[in-house]
């Protein structure tokens, strides 16, 4: 690395948090801190949503997926578009009509405070683990850069520095700073990806694309693989991707907070549906980079042949060692900016609104809400740094690790929302029992059930580590299965009740006067 590259990286890391604070302005209330008082334009929210859900994982790990496989990962994005459309017209109208601060307010109004708190706590811990992976992913290129200077920094030391940078603008700027920083850094790393493609195209031999096609590296649709064991079989990826997107964009406060910061319902819907198209194009961009890297490195194994510590260091290694001075710093700065796609605001808002306020048993003033929001922003930043150090030994592409983590709870979260909408007799106890049952069932399925990697044949139950041909159920099935368990258990329990328990206002999302369920 040359001095110019280091200068670009340092200026970016210092300047981005300051820019976020400047754009956001002074925060005067809890509402302003958590949802920006509805002042965010739809296109800014769209870019923020894309950045929040993919960012570093997309930049570093999706090229690795293509390098080791093909374009079949893009099938997930087809499902993502479908899932976003459903959320736009089913869940978003109810959030906006109820003037809610978090997605889990809906569960509180439909079932009661117990269900709201259960869902919120589940979100907090799931998001903590998933974003721990994200933060660790961003530490990968930094470790490579430091190693080039002979500095052998530990991953936990790197994530601590990144965590401090991330908390600065979230603490002072609230959700407006988060959304604007997300949008800027998303554009930055996409431009960096385009620049990498231009450089690679000039350095690859003539006929490289034809060779990649002949080797099956450009395969998009996979109708032949076993759907139970292969993550990217067509039915698995599209159906699983659709339901996963419904959960992540309709029941995860990380995304819902950004959508609720828009001007109105129509703006939120435009932001959400447009984000699906942008994600599809973005996935295609970084999958193409992975295929080009496969040609550049002649398909050599990243660990055995290229001497890398993990497969996910492949793209970062290329950026540091192969890109010209200046461009290398620009691309790495974009990757580092992805770490600043902060979930701290979502964690703080859910903690204060869904948990803390019920613990103190009184409404908080706007000043108290703002103060607690900032306190919990710092607390969750510390926890995130600790959890980010837990993933340094993962061998799978980190994007797959992050998606698998959500499998334990996303089905239960989305299932609880659908239970409230579809099963009119369901009450709070039914929802909580169904929710907890689903988490237990999914833990059993993910950790215990084993299938043949090649044929998809069920091999039995084994809680030992998968080895050889033995693999767990393909991760895109986790969320659909969890939703099904929640609806079945909750629906059966609801049969013992008479009459509807759905508040009238929740039946009509155009009615803003939503009463709480006693």
Image (cartoon, rainbow, N blue to C red):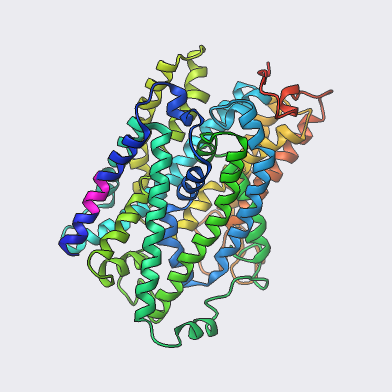
Q: Is residue 8 above or below residue 428?
A: below
Is residue 451 shown above or below 23? below
Q: Nearer the viewer, residue 246 or 137?
A: 246
User: Magenta stretch containing residue 23, yes or no?
Assistant: no
In this picture, residue 153 sits left or right of residue 450: left
Q: Which residue corresponds to the image point at 32% horizontal and 75% vertical from the top-left?
A: 306
- Res. 477 in view: no
Q: Dividing the picture into quarters, in which one does residue 191 lie? A: bottom left
Which picture quadrant has residue 141? bottom left
The image position of residue 201, as x and y in percent, is 39, 78
Residue found 66% across the figure and 48% down from its top: 85
Residue numbers of the magenta segment: 9-14
Looking at the magenta stretch, what is its main secondary structure?
A: helix
Left or right, residue 129 beside residue 9 = right
Residue drawn at (43%, 20%) of the image:
369
Residue furthest out toward the bottom: 206
Quadrant occupied by the N terminus? bottom left
Left or right of 109? Residue 293 is left
Question: Where's residue 343, x and y in %?
Answer: 43, 39
């Amino acid at each position: 690395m040359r001095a110019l590259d280091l200068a670009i990286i340092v200026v970016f890391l210092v300047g981005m948090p300051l820019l976020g604070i400047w754009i956001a302005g002074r925060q005067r209330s809890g509402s302003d801190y958590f949802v920006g008082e509805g002042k965010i334009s739809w296109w800014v929210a769209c870019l923020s949503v894309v950045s929040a859900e993919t960012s570093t994982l997309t930049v570093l790990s999706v090229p690795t997926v293509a390098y080791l496989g093909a374009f079949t990962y893009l099938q997930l994005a087809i499902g993502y578009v479908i899932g976003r459309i459903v959320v736009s017209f089913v869940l978003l109208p109810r959030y906006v009509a109820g003037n809610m601060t978090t997605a889990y307010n809906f569960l509180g109004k439909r079932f009661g405070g117990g269900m709201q708190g259960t869902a919120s706590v589940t979100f907090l811990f799931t998001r903590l683990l998933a974003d721990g992976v994200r933060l660790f992913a961003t530490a990968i290129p930094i470790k490579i850069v430091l190693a080039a200077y002979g500095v052998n920094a530990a991953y936990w030391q790197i994530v601590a520095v990144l965590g401090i940078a991330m908390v600065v603008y979230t603490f002072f700027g609230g959700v407006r700073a988060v959304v604007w920083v997300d949008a800027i850094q998303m554009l930055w790393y996409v431009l960096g990806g385009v620049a990498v493609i231009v450089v690679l195209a000039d350095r690859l031999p003539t006929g490289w694309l034809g060779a990649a096609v002949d080797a099956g590296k450009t395969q998009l649709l996979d109708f032949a693989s076993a759907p139970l064991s292969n993550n990217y079989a067509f039915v698995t990826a599209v159906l699983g991707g659709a339901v996963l997107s419904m959960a992540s964009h309709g029941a995860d406060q990380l995304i819902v907070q950004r959508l609720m910061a828009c001007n109105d319902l129509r703006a939120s819907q435009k932001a959400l549906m447009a984000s699906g198209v942008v994600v599809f194009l973005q996935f295609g961009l970084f999958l193409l980079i992975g295929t080009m890297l496969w040609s550049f490195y002649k398909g050599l194994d990243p660990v055995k042949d290229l001497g890398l510590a993990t497969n996910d260091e492949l793209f970062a290694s290329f950026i540091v060692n192969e890109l010209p001075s200046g461009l290398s710093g620009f691309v790495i700065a974009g990757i580092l900016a992805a770490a600043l796609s902060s979930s701290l605001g979502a964690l703080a808002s859910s903690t204060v609104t869904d948990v803390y306020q019920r613990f103190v048993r009184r409404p908080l003033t706007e000043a108290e809400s703002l103060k607690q929001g900032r306190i919990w922003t710092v607390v969750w930043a510390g926890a995130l740094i600790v959890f980010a150090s837990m993933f340094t030994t993962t061998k799978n592409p980190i994007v797959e690790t992050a998606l698998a983590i959500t499998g334990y709870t996303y089905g239960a979260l989305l299932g609880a929302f659908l239970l409230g909408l579809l099963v009119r007799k369901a009450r709070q106890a039914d929802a909580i029992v169904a929710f907890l049952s689903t988490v237990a069932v999914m833990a059993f399925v993910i950790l215990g059930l084993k299938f043949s990697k090649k044929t998809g044949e069920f091999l039995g139950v084994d809680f030992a580590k998968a080895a050889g041909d033995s693999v767990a159920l393909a991760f895109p099935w986790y969320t659909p299965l969890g939703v099904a368990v929640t609806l079945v258990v909750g629906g059966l329990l609801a049969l013992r009740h008479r009459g509807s328990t759905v508040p009238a206002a929740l039946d009509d999302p155009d009615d803003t006067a939503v009463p709480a369920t006693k």
